[in-house]
């Protein structure tokens, strides 16, 4: 069953400069199954288009971990609601 390409945007922690984000983009772009990888350093977000039959998010997370950064998937993200009073 062909799934086609999937595009996901996820957080990458630990990048501090343009060289860091370039390293992530370069490394993922070389992976078999990755169509494109683009990092926004300011928001610490990676947008990756990939063929799910050739590579998965766990494989990409392992590649990013080896570079010294941390991919945040939905599994380790939490939503927090903080009430703010006194604003008019």
Image (tube, grey):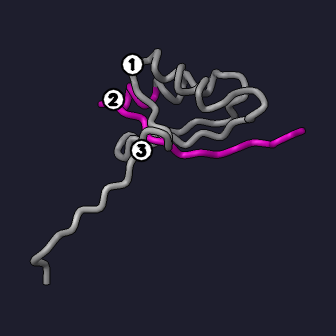
Frontmost residue, 51 versus 39 = 51
Question: Of discs 1 and 3, which sits in the foreground?
Answer: 3
Real-space Cα separation, disc 2 to disc 3, in angstroms:
16 Å
Image spot of residue 66 (x, y percent):
47, 15
Q: Residue furthest bottom?
A: 88
Q: Are marks 2 and 1 in contact (CB under 8 Å)?
A: yes
Question: Mark on residue 14?
Answer: 2
Image spot of residue 6 (x, y percent):
70, 44
Q: Quadrant of the N terminus?
A: top right
What segment carries the magenta color?
A: 1-22
For residue 30, which quarter of the picture?
top right
Mark 3, residue position: 77
Q: Tag 1: Cα neighbours inside 10 Å, few (<14), some, or many (≥20)?
A: few
Q: Count the marks: how many?
A: 3
Q: Secondary structure at mark 3?
A: loop
Q: Quadrant of the C terminus?
A: bottom left
Vertical placement of 5 versus 79: above or below?
above
């Amino acid at each position: 069953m062909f799934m086609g390409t999937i595009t996901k945007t996820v957080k990458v922690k630990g990048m501090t400069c343009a060289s860091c984000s370039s390293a992530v983009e370069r490394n993922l772009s070389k992976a078999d199954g990755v169509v494109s990888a683009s990092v926004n350093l300011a928001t610490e977000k990676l947008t990756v288009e990939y063929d799910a039959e050739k590579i998965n998010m766990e494989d990409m997370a392992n590649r990013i971990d080896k570079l010294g950064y941390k991919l945040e998937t939905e599994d380790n993200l939490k939503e927090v609601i903080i009430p703010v009073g006194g604003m008019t």
